[in-house]
Image: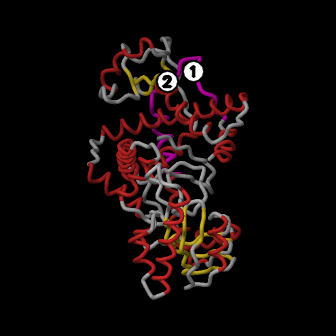
Amino acid sequence: MIIILNLRKDKIMGIHPEECKHGAMKAKRHNFLLFIFYFSLFLAVCGLSCKPKTPAQSDANTPKSDTVAETTPDTTDTTAKTAVETAVDSVVVTVNGVFITESKLEALVEEQFAKIAAKTTQLPPEFAKQYKQQIRTQMLEKLIVEQLLDEKVKEAGIVITEEEVMASLKEQISKQQPSLTLEAFQAMYEARGQNFDELKQQFRKSLGYQKIVMAQGAGEVTVTEEEVEKYYSENQQKFELPEQVRASHILIKPDASDPNTDPNEAKAIARSKAQDLLEQIKAGADFAELAKAHSGCPSGPNGGDLSFFGRGAMVPPFEKAAFELEPGQVSDVVETKFGYHIIKVTDHKEAGVSPFEEVKTRLINELTQRKQLEAFQNYVQSLKNEADIVYPIDKKPKSDTSIFSDLESQYN
């Protein structure tokens, strides 16, 4: 799983799940990824430039013989290879005597590029070539930084247990809106063709890096009230809010499990069930309990709550019905391409600017993360400055990554 971050300081884009709005949300273009802050920090430094050291009258493809035995990781680590293994695989860089090979780098580049190519069918060849080179530069930086941090984790004797990994996953999943159970998230993640074990391994790495970073004091930053107020007053446009409603819904999907079933008959059965549930609600039945028992949407366990959303977030029939309701009102049965919905609006917000007190805590967190990111970048740069990083003459990457930021914004 590769995550590319835009390094603009006002936009740290991390790992987060696709908002389904559970049957009513329009399909989002971004991948279904979880956000974990310190792993995002690690990936963010992929935009930093390495300062390669020039080998002293030796073959640039050959690491120092007296360091290979000490720095070559276990055979289970596919990031680095020994001299024998790289005999048929060119070396793009050595980091403290450890080989990083062309095959490893190219695999990451192709994986990331495939995700981008899948989002567009009209990527001009010359544009694709240029973009691929930018991805290559970023992925090479990723491998270098990962190697340096892995060394530090190993030196410190840090071991991340399965319990720590699962606890971190649960914490991050619980922060999503609406929140999901770990089991539900895993099912959704794997349904998208993603490998859950690989995700856990990424979290394990992230937690190891987090401990290294915290030990360097990168987590010990403070944000003052004055800094928060200043940021709020100077960035009012960021806190403008469109009209929003908060709604819950019950989704009844036509049964498509039997290919021999007449689609029209399946739709009629689903509509009838939705109508029956609506009559129960009108008679006083608890909406949330019916959603938990009958909704075909992942929001069901949360009583059907979709949290707040603005115009354009939902498919048109759902949006029209939701924005016409007053808080406390329940819609008639609404048909969309996903099935049949019963919608209950629970709150409504007019367009305006978020009051300072409402965003204060979030701003403190954001500004704290920004300072932590800067501290982390400084730490990683110090590791690079101290490291023996050697590029073969024809493998040295270009330092200009400005085009990448623009492309990443366009295709994420």
Q: Residue at x 48, y 42 (%)?
A: 380
Q: Sort mark 2 into few (<14), some (14-19) or many (20+) by Cα contacts within 10 Å.
A: many
Residue under the image location 71 percent in, 68 percent down: 237
Q: Give yes or no for contact between labels 2 and 1 (Cβ–Cβ under 8 Å).
A: yes
Question: Which residue is pictured at 40% across the width and 24% down the height?
Answer: 98
* Residue 59, image x, y percentages: 48, 11
Residue drawn at x 61%, y 80% as measured from the top left: 348
Q: Position of residue 403 (x, y in %)?
A: 69, 38
| Residue 367 in view here | no
**Residue situated furthest bottom in the rendering:** 284
> Taking 121 as reference, is 228 above or below it?
below
Magenta highlight on residue 293: no
Q: Is residue 271 visible?
A: yes
Q: Residue 65 falls in which quadrant of the image?
A: top left
Q: Identify the residue under disc 1.
A: 395
Q: Which residues, given as a range, are shown in magenta?
A: 374-400
Q: Secondary structure at mark 2?
A: strand
- Give whichever of discs 2 and 1 has the lower sequence position: 2
Residue type pointed to by label 1: Lys
Quadrant hosting residue 227: bottom right
Label 1 sits on a secondary structure element that is helix
Mark 1 closeness class: few <14, some 14–19, many ≥20 residues within 10 Å: few
